[in-house]
Amino acid sequence: MAVATTATLGDLVAEDPRRSRVLEQLGLDYCCHGQRPLEEAARTAGLDVMDVSTRLDLPGERPAVIARDLEMAALAHDIVDTHHAYTWEEMPRLQALVDKVAGVHGDRHPELAEVKATYERIIAELEPHMTREERVIFPAISRLEKTQAPVRLSSGDFSDALRELIAEHDVVGDLLTRIRGLTGGHTPPEDACNSYRAMLTGLAELERDVHEHVHKENNLLFPRVLEMQERLSGA
């Protein structure tokens, strides 16, 4: 049975996280553009709407615990434990691979210079972004949920801070898309050594993890936090 074509991509993945893999394979952005209805997203991508809808009706049981069902503070902890931990560990490992591959293969593959520069921009975006979430934003979300009182940040308006984080997600998403384009969809060339292949595999895995990470924040956590903050503030 096909899924509803009027449902948004974000809602479809929230309902069954396994669908993220199908959307990744089809090149449909469920994280930064998760508010688009399936029908609109599929048509824009030149895909058959009903075929996509049918492919998203996955057999078997969905995971017993899904992010959508978690309380806000618990979801924030899940993001840190699952996605931040992975990214903090993976960024320096990938940086070393990118540096090595660009140095060894750069003459034959000049696009690697831009891959390296783009990857360094991704790190420059993600490091302060995740640090701010861990030190300021996520503790504030826990206070909001626990006290049921609007949050006030010394650095500015809490709702504006959340919207800034969402905008930063768009920047990182665009940079990851740029790397995918430069590498032909993370496809190794014929002369790729093991390090080259490991770099491409790592970049592809980082992109998938960031998509899941951003989906949880953009489509699940931050909308709930914004709604509660504005309701409690009388906005």
Image (spheres, grey):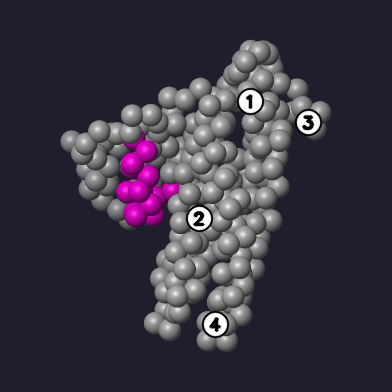
Residue type indicated by callout 4: His
N-terminal label among 3 and 1? 1
Decide which of tag 2 and tag 1 comes sooner along the chain: 1
Question: Rounded to the nearest whole Å, what is the CA distance between mark 2 and mark 1?
Answer: 26 Å
Per the image, the residue denoted by label 3 is: 156
Q: Between residue 81 and residue 179, name the one nearer to us.
A: 81
| Tags 2 and 4 touching, CB below 8 Å | no
Marks 2 and 4 sit apart, C-alpha to C-alpha, by 22 Å
Q: Name the residue under label 2.
A: 206
Q: Looking at the image, can residue 200 be seen?
A: yes
Note whether residue 119 is visible: no
| Residue visible at 50% across and 55% down in the picture | 206
Give, as a three-letter code, the residue at label 1: Ile
Distance from Cα at disc 3 to Cα at disc 1: 15 Å
Residue pointed to by mark 1 = 141
Dot 3 amino acid type = Gly
Element at label 2: helix
From which residue to which does the magenta span run? 16-29
What residue lies at 49% left-to-right and 55% top-to-bottom? 207
Q: Residue 105 carries which label?
A: 4
